[in-house]
Image (cartoon, rainbow, N blue to C red):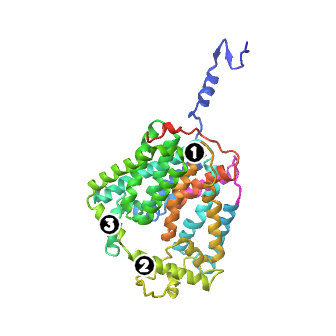
């Protein structure tokens, strides 16, 4: 006969042992989120308003202060997992150092635009990538991140649909319609593009796509009310990306969806339902917004942006040939790039005072070929390395999320300066955890149960 354990008295459990048993049940948790994680979540949510804090009556964007506080708190925290440097960390750190030295030598390190570009494009993504394993060490923290992105996606979807319907009086914050109207004289085509709180179609489309993918991941990991919310928000976000009128985002979303479905056998059975749902939502959106189809057709035939892209890319290649080691300096292309732009008989020269419309060529032209190599190495040993590692359970869901978000981000990198902080911060944060869990095997990371294929949100 099995002896009575120390936790029973006359066959009954003591109250404190009953509490421990409840805490051990699947999905139950007594964990409290650290202040650093709250700073991360709120900072990411407020980052969608980055650049317009003065329009909201704020002297400085709260997102920057909150993200800095999150990093500082996690670095000072003594708990595991500790920060560990691997190949992508060294590549990103060296790239950030080259950017700082380049800005310093060209005298624009403390210049507002150059400084924030340095932070948003090189420094903060690296810092979040390095600290993500500690910030997202437990299932509850990761679930809260996905829930935050899902709520952000719901907000962006509502604002995007209101913009498409020209219901500007219902949009909050009020700076969104105000700035949009102010820019109409210089950019009349922007009236067709739903820019959301970014007041620009491209970052709004990227953010919608990434939040939609995060909502889908959340629906795969949880049950109950949040699963229902995520299953509603995910398709709404992906449909709303169409209203951004940005071809690179459309292509990135398509590649991300196809890549996730093709690499995940459990999703194959839901392909007909996914296609049917997208057709229904797209048809409903077309009926609700009659001008959308015409706007999409017009946007698809626009060629001026293609000419600008080809001209700046050719100039960037010429700069790398003339200055292969150091480039012309951080954020110098918009000022000096005109000297390498040449008139081509096959395309008109419409604009010369713009950034390179390719992030890879931009890094090489402004920071030199060694910096371009480091940038490629960071991508290959970071997001790309995550895609090559499969592991059942929650890590597989995060691998799918990295694949989807990286597809959108990479396509935009190949076709524009991609200067927007929110998509980059989301990508490198989720990649930081996924890399630690799948590639480097950082200890101390806990896994959460994942829903079976029969419990898919598509059911």
The residue that appears at 40% across and 49% down in the rendered structure is 275
Q: Is residue 409 above or below residue 447?
A: below
Q: Nearer the viewer, residue 455 or 210?
A: 455
Instruction: Give the quadrant of the N terminus.
Output: top right
Q: In this image, 373 relative to 232: left or right?
A: right
Q: In this image, 134 relative to 150: left or right?
A: right
Q: Quadrant of residue 316?
A: bottom right
The residue that appears at 65% across and 13% down in the rendered structure is 11
Q: Nearer the viewer, residue 116 or 389?
A: 389
Q: Which mark is residue 244?
A: none
Q: Which mark is residue 307?
A: 2
Q: Which residues are magenta?
A: 65-86
- Is disc 3 surrounded by few (<14), some (14 to 19) or many (20+) residues within 10 Å? few
Q: Disc 1 on helix, strand or loop?
A: helix
Q: Is residue 67 magenta?
A: yes
The residue that appears at 31% across and 56% down in the rendered structure is 162
Q: Quadrant of residue 173?
A: bottom left
What residue is pinned by disc 1? Answer: 141
Which label sits in the foreground, 2 or 1? Answer: 2
Q: Nearer the viewer, residue 279 or 107?
A: 279
Q: Disc 2 on helix, strand or loop?
A: helix
Q: Position of residue 367 (x, y in %)?
A: 61, 76
What residue is pinned by disc 3? Answer: 297
Q: Position of residue 300 (x, y in %)?
A: 36, 68
Q: Tell me how far mark 3 sits from mark 1, CA to CA.
A: 42 Å
The first of marks 2 and 3 along the sequence is 3
Q: Is residue 48 magenta?
A: no
């Amino acid at each position: 006969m099995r002896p009575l354990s120390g936790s029973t008295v006359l066959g009954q459990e003591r109250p404190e042992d009953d509490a421990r048993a409840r805490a051990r049940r699947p999905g139950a948790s007594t964990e409290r989120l650290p202040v650093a994680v709250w700073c991360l979540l709120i900072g990411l949510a407020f980052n969608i308003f980055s650049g317009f804090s003065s329009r909201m009556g704020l002297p400085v964007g709260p997102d920057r202060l909150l993200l800095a506080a999150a990093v500082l708190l996690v670095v000072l925290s003594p708990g595991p997992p500790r920060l560990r440097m691997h190949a992508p960390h060294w590549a990103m750190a060296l790239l950030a150092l080259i950017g700082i030295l380049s800005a310093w030598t060209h005298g624009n390190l403390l210049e507002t635009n150059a400084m924030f570009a340095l932070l948003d494009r090189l420094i903060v993504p690296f810092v979040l990538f390095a600290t993500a394993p500690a910030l997202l060490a437990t299932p509850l923290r990761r679930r809260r991140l996905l829930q935050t992105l899902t709520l952000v996606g719901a907000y962006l979807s509502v604002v995007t649909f209101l913009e498409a319907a020209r219901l500007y009086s219902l949009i909050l914050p009020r700076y969104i319609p105000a700035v949009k109207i102010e820019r109409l004289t210089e950019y009349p085509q922007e009236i067709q593009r739903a820019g959301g709180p970014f007041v620009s179609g491209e970052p709004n489309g990227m953010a919608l796509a990434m939040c939609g993918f995060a909502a889908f991941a959340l629906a795969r990991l949880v049950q109950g009310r949040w699963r229902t919310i995520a299953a509603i928000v995910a398709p709404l976000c992906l449909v709303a990306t169409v209203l951004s009128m940005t071809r690179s985002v459309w292509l990135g979303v398509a590649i991300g969806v196809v890549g996730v479905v093709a690499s995940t056998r459990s999703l194959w059975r839901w392909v007909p339902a996914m296609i049917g749902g997208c057709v229904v939502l797209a048809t409903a959106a077309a009926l609700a917004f009659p001008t959308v189809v015409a706007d999409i057709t017009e946007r698809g035939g626009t060629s001026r942006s293609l000419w600008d892209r080809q001209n700046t890319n050719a100039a960037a290649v010429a700069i790398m040939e003339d200055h292969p080691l150091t480039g012309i300096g951080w954020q110098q292309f918009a000022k000096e790039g005109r000297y390498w732009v040449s008139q081509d008989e096959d395309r008109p020269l419409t604009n010369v005072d713009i950034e390179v419309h390719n992030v890879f060529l931009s890094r090489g032209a402004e920071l030199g070929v060694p910096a371009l190599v480091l940038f490629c190495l960071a991508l290959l040993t970071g997001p790309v390395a995550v895609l090559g590692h499969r592991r059942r359970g929650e890590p597989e869901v995060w691998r799918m999320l990295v694949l989807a978000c990286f597809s959108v981000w990479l396509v935009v990198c190949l076709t524009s300066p991609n200067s927007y902080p929110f998509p980059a911060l989301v990508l490198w944060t989720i990649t930081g955890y996924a890399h630690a869990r799948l590639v480097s095997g950082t200890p101390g990371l806990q896994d959460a149960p994942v829903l079976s294929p029969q419990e898919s949100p598509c059911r």
